[in-house]
Amino acid sequence: MQLPRPYSSAVVFPLTSSASALPRFVPMAGLMLGRLLCRQLTWRPARLLIALSVLVPASALAETQATAAPESYASGSRAFVQDMARKHGFAPAQLNALMAEARYQQRIIDAMNRPYEAKPWRDYRPIFVTPERIAAGVAFWRDNAALLARAQAAYGVPPEVMVAITGVETNYGGNLGGHRVIDALSTLGFSYPRRADFFRRELEEFLLLTRDERVDPFAAKGSYAGALGKPQFIPSSYRAYAVDFDKDGRRDLWASNADVLGSIGNYLAAHGWRRGQPIAAAAVLSEGLPAGIAVADKRPAPPRATLSQLATAGVTPAAQHQNGLTDAGTRATLIALDGMETEYWLGFENFYAITRYNHSNLYAMAVYQLSREIARQYRDAQED
Ligand SMILES: [Ca+2]
């Protein structure tokens, strides 16, 4: 995985309007190859494609076969440059030069239209809660035990939750996403009307981030939705919640596990995590669907009903999940998930905090269940 490189002193960035020279971009091997291929494709496509299919992974090949960008992309880019110049003092000529290197990617639009979270729970869970991901989580915990203890002390989040989030997001850093962040955010920000405003703001945040943290905007790789680093923070979250937990002067969510784990802890603490409180519990419905209690599906909802109100309506935590549930005033959301049969769960404040990381009850439940398995196996191994 190619990591974002800090800017060398030879490269002019930030792009302030007072700077007169055009930025001298570091030549990118991938970009150069892409240009070379595009040129060659115009004169001998068939033979070249056969040769390339041997040498170049399919994903890289697809990238060279550029889909024509819709008109919205060029006009969006022009308006964006003007906005950034006005709001943040970027030099228009230099930012135009930078944006001219960004590429519309149809495959990013396609990926947005089939998200994992559209799957039912019975298909979603097996993607993330697997023996391999549990074992790798135990190893990741062992390798980062001191950092995790320090992050738990600082933010109150148990190690297994920070480990499980890293595991669900990027398989502990093993899969950081293969898209250039600038391509993903410009494609979605200019040419994905349903959420264009959101992604355009994230593109703005991304350019500010690269300026502040001295990250090369073309080397930053991420998911198709523009999420960054091992914890997959979107740029606005990176700027607001990432912490320099190893105190080296940079917030590096790619290479520093200290910064990664500290940032996850800080994010959850800032979104309502309660130290020592439960996350979720399987629910038993003794009287069928309870009257007067809202039932959430995959869409998160803040906990409103107390355990005592739930009990009155016939909803109680399953015996194996009653540990720590001694306060009848604890609030929960009753959640129904479409497993092989419908599963009922109680999600507490900490469950809702995990949904602030990714707005899906499926996501939070996968993190919770993965964290339980990792914790069990980690502690078993400690006792051996
Ligand atoms: Ca750092």
Image: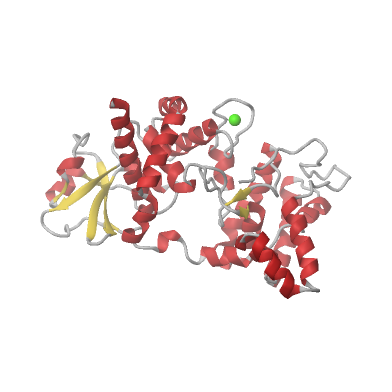
The picture quadrant where one finds residue 63 is bottom right
Q: Residue at x 35, y 49 (%)?
A: 129
Q: Identify the coloring.
A: secondary structure
Quarter that holds the C terminus: top left
Give the image location of residue 95, x and y in percent: 78, 52
Residue 30, image quadrant = bottom right
Tell me, yes or no, if residue 82 can be seen here: no
Left or right? Give the position of 68 relative to 256. Answer: right
**For the image shown, how many numbered marks are present on the structure?**
0
Farthest residue, direction right: 20
The single residue placed furthest to the left in the displayed view is 287
Image: 324 above or below 188: above
x then y, percent, for residue 13: 77, 42
Relative to 118, say whether 302 is above or below: above
Instruction: State which image quarter holds ligand 1.
Output: top right
Q: Along the horizontal axis of the image, is 371 left or right of 108? A: left
Residue 70 visible within the image:
yes
Q: Quadrant of residue 61?
A: bottom right
Residue at image location 54% in from the left, 28% down from the top: 245
Which residue is painted at 38% across and 63% down in the image?
119
Give the x, y percent position of residue 339. Answer: 27, 60
242 horizontally vs 324: left or right:
right
Q: Is residue 36 left or right of residue 171?
A: right
Percent across and percent down for residue 248 are 62, 26
